[in-house]
């Protein structure tokens, strides 16, 4: 699938998140999004992109999920889609200066996608324990990202409340 950094295949489209998470309609594909369901989904984002100048593929998957739902007229309520970032992926939530210090790449290519996701109602969060483990100052976390006590407690709490977990 194409991302915001490359050309989209013919027929690809985005219905909710512009420029990210391209989808392509496939004739006769089954198991369509169900408008009668409440989509409460938790994405665990732990893996880093292959190189720090690329958008994190697990974060891009969140945009693709929203675009797939949106193509069938399904829009989760604000806060019903949650992203928890932890592990090696943790630097994707920091400002450009901190990203440069952590990765050597002059700008964080994930910030535009994080902004688009939050504008679409996604709650983007980062594990405070992962910040400490990666030696990242909480003050450098992008202002639209919430700092949670831990990814472990976020994942346990939300799953116990009915969120479906999608790991990366």
Image: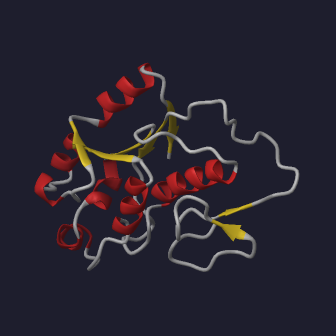
Is 39 placed left or right of 152 in the picture?
Answer: right
Q: How is the image coloured?
A: secondary structure
Task: Using the image, determine if residue 80 lies above or below residue 162.
Answer: below
Q: Residue at x 25, y 46 (%)?
A: 146
Q: Quadrant of residue 96?
A: bottom left
Is 104 placed left or right of 137 in the picture?
Answer: right
Query: Image quadrant for the N terminus?
Result: bottom right
Between 2 and 77, the residue placed more toward the observer is 77
Tell me residue 71's x, y (percent).
68, 54
Between 162 and 101, the residue placed more toward the observer is 162
Q: Residue at x 20, y 57 (%)?
A: 141
Task: Using the image, determine if residue 96 lies above or below residue 114.
Answer: below
Q: Quadrant of residue 52?
A: bottom left
The number of callouts visible is 0
The outermost residue toward the top is: 160
Tell me residue 59's x, y (percent).
45, 56
Tell me residue 79's x, y (percent).
40, 39
Tell me residue 167's x, y (percent).
50, 41
Q: Residue at x 17, y 72 (%)?
A: 97
Q: Residue at x 56, y 45 (%)?
A: 75
Between 41 and 18, the residue placed more toward the observer is 18
């Amino acid at each position: 699938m194409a991302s915001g950094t490359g050309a989209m295949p013919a027929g690809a489209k985005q219905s909710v998140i512009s420029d990210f998470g391209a989808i392509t309609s496939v004739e006769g594909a089954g198991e369509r999004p169900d408008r009668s369901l409440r989509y409460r989904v938790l994405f665990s984002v732990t893996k880093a992109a292959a190189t720090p100048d690329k958008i994190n593929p697990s974060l891009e998957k969140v945009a693709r999920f929203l675009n797939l739902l949106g193509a069938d007229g399904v829009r989760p309520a604000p806060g019903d889609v949650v992203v928890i970032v932890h592990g090696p992926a943790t630097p994707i939530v920091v400002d450009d200066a901190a990203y440069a210090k952590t990765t050597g790449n002059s700008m964080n290519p994930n910030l535009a996608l994080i902004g688009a996701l939050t504008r679409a109602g996604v709650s983007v969060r980062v594990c405070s324990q992962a910040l400490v483990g990666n030696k990242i100052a909480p003050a450098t976390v992008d202002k639209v990202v919430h700092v949670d006590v831990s990814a472990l407690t976020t994942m346990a709490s939300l799953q116990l409340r009915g969120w479906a977990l999608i790991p990366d």
